[in-house]
Image (cartoon, grey):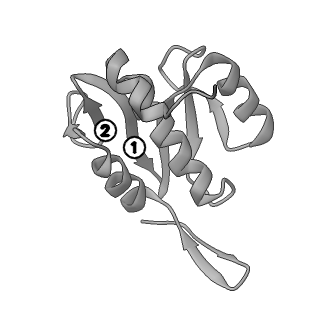
Amino acid sequence: MDNLKYDGGLLMSFGFNAARAYCLEQPGSVEDFPFGPDIYVYKSHTKVFAILTEKDTLARINLKADPTEAVMLRQLFAAVTPGYHMNKTHWNTVMLDGTVPVNEIKRQIDNSWALIQPKRRRKAAQGPTPD
């Protein structure tokens, strides 16, 4: 079930279903269930970029992150913690409880996807470098 939050006149929703749909929108994304039917794993080029679960109607998503950014995100958002059952240096768990802005969650998913791309594709995803 998606969590709803009233924000500035707009009803914002980014729970399990929204996270699942957004992960599947990533180019080359494949949904897999290697850990059982309740653990949704998203891969691109056979590499994992997101793991989505839901327990007691609260969705959580594990996302890959640059180590420096991972720590910064944990300091900014109480809903972002070191990756559950993951390498704590490179992964964060984001609770989809409505406290992290939707665009920020999407940015983290995009970033996680970009980090697991082959080097050539990763460079293109990051955009041109400034002169």
How far across and down, in percent of the image, does residue 36 sit? Answer: 22, 34
Whether 96 is drawn above or below 64: the answer is below
The three-letter amino acid code for the residue at tag 2 is: Ile
Measured as percent of width and height from the top left, residue 34 is found at: 20, 28
Q: Which mark is residue 97?
A: none
The residue drawn where x is 38% and y is 22% is 116
Name which of mark 1 and mark 2 comes first in the sequence.
2
| Front-most of residues 131 and 118 | 131
* Residue 50 found in image quarter: top left
Mark 1: few/some/many CA within 10 Å (<14, 14-19, 20+): some
Image x and y of residue 66, in percent: 59, 21
Along the line of sight, which residue is nearer the eye, 45 or 42? 45
**Is residue 90 shown above or below 60?**
above
Secondary structure of the residue carrying numbered label 1 = strand
Q: Residue pushed farthest front?
A: 131
The residue lying at 30 percent from left, 52 percent from top is: 25
Say which residue label 2 marks.
39
Instruction: Name the residue that disc number 1 marks.
Output: 53
Q: Quadrant of the N terminus?
A: bottom left
Residue at the far right in the pictured view? 75
Say which quadrant the C terminus sits in.
top right
